[in-house]
Each structure stands twice: as structure tokens, then as C-alpha cells.
């Protein structure tokens, strides 16, 4: 017990100190903080862009391999465990994990940006539109979900099948042995906490920017950092109250509300926008995305200056953001996937969110470009305001804008509340009931980091957000690689023990099942 207390205090204390120093420095010296983070982020992007692209591609290939290998027959849990959630509910929750502030913020803004400044094509041409949709699908498609999936897979296998605590460090036991119970394990957990804070803070930052953009467009409220700070403060009070009181049902209702509002908004834009163009371009762009997947996965454009600069602003930024988000999303996905086979898990995690993203960006992206061609002022708007400018040109504009505003605020609250739980769990031995005080501390830290990043990001606020995600992802990427190696080592040993092949040894499987049943009866 004393060891647990000591470990809790070290991870919590060290992570708190690191975050506290960053917040203090950023609040007192916002300009210097912005320059330092931008400089470090630019250096990492230029120096390690090839590394990010290679790691994401190898993880994607490895994740697919796991789904179709004999390891895919193993279960995320004991042999007798049944899935906790029905398949439809499980897929819906995967959809929920795939939806968030990022999709609402970039739903129209990213395709428009690529259309105006494409990777290789001439701007504002049909070729630029094709590249815009393909590139957006690439950023929200298989690659991020393979990274989320590896983290979730290692966590679920370690926790539900091997009986380990639900901590990132414990997944590395097959590689590091008992060292995961000492200082090395603490370092790994501190890195995962830091990555989670930065990843979620980036989302909260762009959420505050878009809420402010919507209020500015609809009601004329000033669009500046002061208002964004007030928005963060109000939302912080709401999600901290929920975190402190443990209103899990309230968050569950909010999550369901998110899905309902997102569905209504999507259907409305699909019907009121250029419906036929949406379906035609979605089909064509999906084929283009799949056809160029391997090439674009490894292309760092060393000889194409236009694409190289574009990748630094978009692809590398996204890869950093997704990597820093992976502990948060991974823990969520692991939690809901107990009792599923690895093969079922891989197929669902890869395809369900990717398909949802393709539909979402097709509807909002193509509607945005089409509206912008008729109303050129749309193209001049900042990204946090563009969605509301586009909705203003559609029928039922006021209703749709209010729905969008409520949806963003709801995503903001639920994401922050869930993040405080995940951070509390990571600093409390993986317990599913972290202390209220711990959640309050991490909730305040999330909001403080989000606002500091906005303060140091200049006029747009996006510069520091992008730099922060890229910086935090670099050290944590090493942890993810080790998680993949550790999981394969452990799972492959069990696969050999069970004699699992593409054609299973039924006799050995029956012996293993009988043994497990006998152990249950003895207990």
C-alpha cells in the first residue's frame, strides 16, 4: 500500500510540476512562450517529419496485420468474458470517440483551406478540390485510428486478459519487466499524462475559438482572447462541477445529445447542400484516397517545396495531435472493448470512425466550397467563423447555427470531463474512481494550458496549439512503439501456447477452455 501511495504521489507530483511550470511561464511571458514553442515545433517538423510519417505507416500496417493474423482470434479479456456492450452500442461509442471538436472545427475549414492552397495542384481548380477531399480523408482516416487502436489494444489486453492495472506503463511489462513498477514506469506514466493534457488542451483551445467565432457571427460579441478566456472559464466551472459531483449519468446524456445534434446537423447539411455533388465526390475521393494511400503515407515531399510546406502545416501537425490524443482515446476505447476479439476490434476501430469521417467531411467540405464559390467572403473568414458563415447561406440558418454552437459547447464539456477522469485514473493507479481533488487539479490544468496556448499563439491562436501537439507527440511516440512491441511479444507467446493458426487446433482449444472452466468452478 505504501508503494502504491508513493507511486501515486510521484506521477501526480511530477506531472503537476511540469504542467504548472509551463502554465506559469506561458502566462507571465506569453510572447516568449509562443516563440519558443513555435521554434521547437518547427525544428521537430523539419527534422522529424520523416519519422512521424514512418511511425504512423508502420503502426497502420502492423495493426492490419494483427487483425488478420492468428493473434486476431485472442480475446480482450478472459476466455469466458462476454462483451459488456451490445455491438450496435459499441459501434456507436466508437463513433462517439471519432466525433469531437476537431471534426466540427475543421469540417468545412480544412477542405476549403486545401482548395485555396492545395498540396500540389493549382489553387481553386477541379484538381485542387479533388486533392482537398483526398487529403482531408487521409488526415482523418486509417492512420490516426491505427495509433489509437494500438494504444487501446495494448491497454485492454494488459488489463483485461493479464490482470494488470490500467496504466500505460503496465503495458510495457513484456519488454521492461518489473522496471515498470519503478522510476521507469513513473516516467512513462508522466509522459502519457503530459501527452493527454496537451492533446486535449489543443481541442479545448480550438473549441473556445469556434464558440467565440459563432457568438461573434451571430450576436456581434468581440472575437478576441479575452472572450475566449471567459468562455473557457465558464465551461471549466460546468465540467468541474460534473467531475467533482460524479454526475456520470449527466455526461452520458450529454454524449447522447452530442450524437443526436451531430446527426441532425449532418443530415441537414447533406440535404440543404449540394447533395448530388456530395455523393459523387465522396465516392470519387474515397477511391482516390485508397488508391494513393501507401504513397502518401510515406511521401515527405523532399523535392516538392509546395507540398513540403503544406505537409508541415497540416499532415505533421495532425500526426502530432493524434499521437498526443492517443492515451485519452485509447483508454476510452479499451474501456468499452472488453470481451471483443482482437480481429473484431481491429476491423471496427479502423473502419467505423473512418467511414463516419468520410461522410462528415464530404457533406461539410463540399457544401463549404460550393457556398464559398457563390459567396467569396466565406473564403476570407478565419476558420473558427467559416462554419457559421456557411450555415448562414443555407435555409434554416439561425436554427442550424444555434445547433452547431450547442454541439461545440457540449463536445467541449464532455471532452474536458472525460479527460479529467482519464488523467485522474492515470495518476491514481488506474482506478476507475479517482479522487475528486485529483480530477479538479487536472481540470484546472487543462483549462489553464488551453488558454496559455491561445495567449501565446498570436492573432489566430492556432500556431501555439499546433506546435504544442507536435512537441508532446515526439517523446510519447517512443512509448507507443514500445507498447506495440510489448503487446506483440506477449500476445504471440499466448498464441503459440494455444496453438492458434489460421486453422485452429480444436483439441488444444478445447483443453484450454476446459481448464479455464475448471478454474472458474474452483473459484
Image: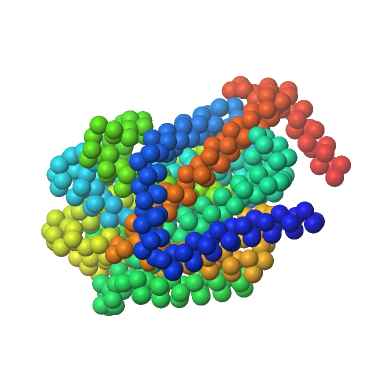
Q: Is residue 66 left or right of residue 451?
A: right
Vertical position of residue 414 compared to residue 180: above or below: below
Q: In the rendering, at what x and y percent does residue 125 appear?
A: 14, 44
Q: Quadrant of the N terminus?
A: bottom right
Tell me the residue at 30%/69% (across/down): 213
Q: Quadrant of the C terminus?
A: top right
| Picture residue at 74% right of the left edge, 56% below the top | 6
Where residue 62 sits in the image (x, y, percent)?
50, 31
- Residue 338 visible from this viewpoint: no
**Left or right: 431 with respect to 330?**
right
Q: Nearer the viewer, residue 57 or 513?
A: 57
Residue at the right extreme, as displayed: 522
Q: Nearer the viewer, residue 285 or 509?
A: 285
In the rendered structure, the answer to whether residue 511 lies left or right of residue 469 reads right
Please give the name of the residue rendered at 33% of the width and 30% of the height, measured from the top-left corner: 295
Residue 183 image offset from top left, x and y in percent: 68, 47
Indicate the colouring scheme: rainbow
Instruction: Give the vertical position of 449 relative to 73 (above or below).
Output: below
Left or right: where 362 falls relative to 341: left
Q: Nearer the viewer, residue 496 or 278?
A: 496
Q: Is residue 24 visible?
A: yes
Amino acid at each position: 500500500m505504501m508503494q502504491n501511495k508513493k507511486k501515486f504521489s510521484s506521477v501526480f507530483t511530477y506531472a503537476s510540476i511540469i504542467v504548472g511550470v509551463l502554465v506559469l511561464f506561458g502566462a507571465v511571458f506569453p510572447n516568449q512562450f509562443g516563440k519558443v514553442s513555435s521554434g521547437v515545433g518547427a525544428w521537430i517538423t523539419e527534422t522529424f517529419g520523416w519519422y512521424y510519417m514512418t511511425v504512423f505507416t508502420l503502426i497502420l500496417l502492423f495493426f492490419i496485420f494483427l487483425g488478420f493474423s492468428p493473434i486476431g482470434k485472442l480475446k480482450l479479456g478472459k476466455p469466458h468474458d462476454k462483451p459488456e456492450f451490445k455491438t450496435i452500442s459499441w459501434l456507436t461509442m466508437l463513433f462517439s470517440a471519432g466525433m469531437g471538436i476537431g471534426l466540427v472545427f475543421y469540417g468545412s475549414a480544412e477542405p476549403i483551406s486545401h482548395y485555396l492552397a492545395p498540396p500540389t495542384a493549382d489553387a481553386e481548380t477541379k484538381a485542387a478540390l479533388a486533392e482537398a477531399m483526398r487529403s482531408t480523408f487521409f488526415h482523418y482516416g486509417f492512420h490516426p485510428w491505427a495509433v489509437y487502436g494500438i494504444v487501446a489494444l495494448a491497454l485492454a489486453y494488459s488489463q483485461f486478459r493479464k490482470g494488470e492495472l490500467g496504466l500505460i506503463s503496465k503495458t510495457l511489462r513484456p519488454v521492461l519487466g518489473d522496471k515498470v513498477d519503478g522510476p521507469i514506469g513513473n516516467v512513462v506514466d508522466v509522459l502519457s499524462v503530459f501527452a493527454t493534457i496537451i492533446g486535449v488542451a489543443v481541442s479545448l483551445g480550438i473549441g473556445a475559438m469556434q464558440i467565440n467565432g459563432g457568438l461573434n457571427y451571430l450576436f456581434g460579441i468581440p472575437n478576441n482572447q479575452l472572450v475566449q478566456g471567459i468562455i473557457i472559464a465558464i465551461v471549466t466551472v460546468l465540467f468541474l462541477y460534473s467531475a467533482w459531483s460524479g454526475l456520470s449519468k449527466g455526461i452520458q446524456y450529454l454524449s447522447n445529445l452530442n450524437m443526436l445534434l451531430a446527426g441532425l446537423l449532418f443530415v441537414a447539411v447533406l440535404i440543404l447542400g449540394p447533395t448530388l455533388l456530395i455523393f459523387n465526390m465522396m465516392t470519387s475521393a474515397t477511391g482516390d484516397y485508397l488508391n494513393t494511400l501507401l504513397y502518401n503515407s510515406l511521401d515527405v515531399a523532399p523535392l516538392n517545396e509546395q507540398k513540403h510546406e503544406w505537409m508541415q502545416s497540416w499532415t505533421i501537425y495532425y500526426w502530432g495531435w493524434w499521437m498526443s490524443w492517443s492515451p485519452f482515446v485509447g483508454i476510452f476505447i479499451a474501456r468499452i472493448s472488453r470481451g471483443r476479439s482482437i480481429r473484431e476490434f481491429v476491423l471496427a476501430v479502423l473502419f467505423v470512425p473512418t467511414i463516419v469521417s468520410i461522410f462528415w467531411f464530404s457533406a461539410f467540405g463540399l457544401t463549404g466550397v460550393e457556398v464559398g464559390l457563390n459567396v467569396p467572403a466565406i473564403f476570407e473568414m478565419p476558420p473558427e467563423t467559416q462554419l457559421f458563415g456557411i450555415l448562414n447561406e443555407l435555409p434554416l440558418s439561425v436554427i442550424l447555427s444555434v445547433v452547431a454552437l450547442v454541439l461545440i459547447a457540449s463536445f467541449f464539456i464532455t471532452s474536458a470531463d472525460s479527460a479529467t477522469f482519464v488523467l485522474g485514473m492515470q495518476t491514481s493507479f488506474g482506478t476507475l474512481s479517482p479522487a475528486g481533488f485529483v480530477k479538479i487539479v487536472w481540470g484546472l490544468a487543462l483549462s489553464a494550458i488551453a488558454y496559455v496556448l491561445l495567449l501565446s499563439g498570436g492573432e489566430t491562436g492556432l500556431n501555439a496549439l499546433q506546435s504544442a501537439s507536435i512537441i508532446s507527440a515526439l517523446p510519447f511516440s517512443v512509448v507507443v512503439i514500445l507498447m506495440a512491441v510489448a503487446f506483440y511479444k506477449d500476445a504471440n507467446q499466448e498464441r503459440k501456447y494455444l496453438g492458434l493458426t489460421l486453422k485452429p487446433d480444436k483439441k488444444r482449444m478445447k483443453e484450454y477452455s476446459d481448464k479455464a472452466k475448471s478454474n472458474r468452478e474452483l473459484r
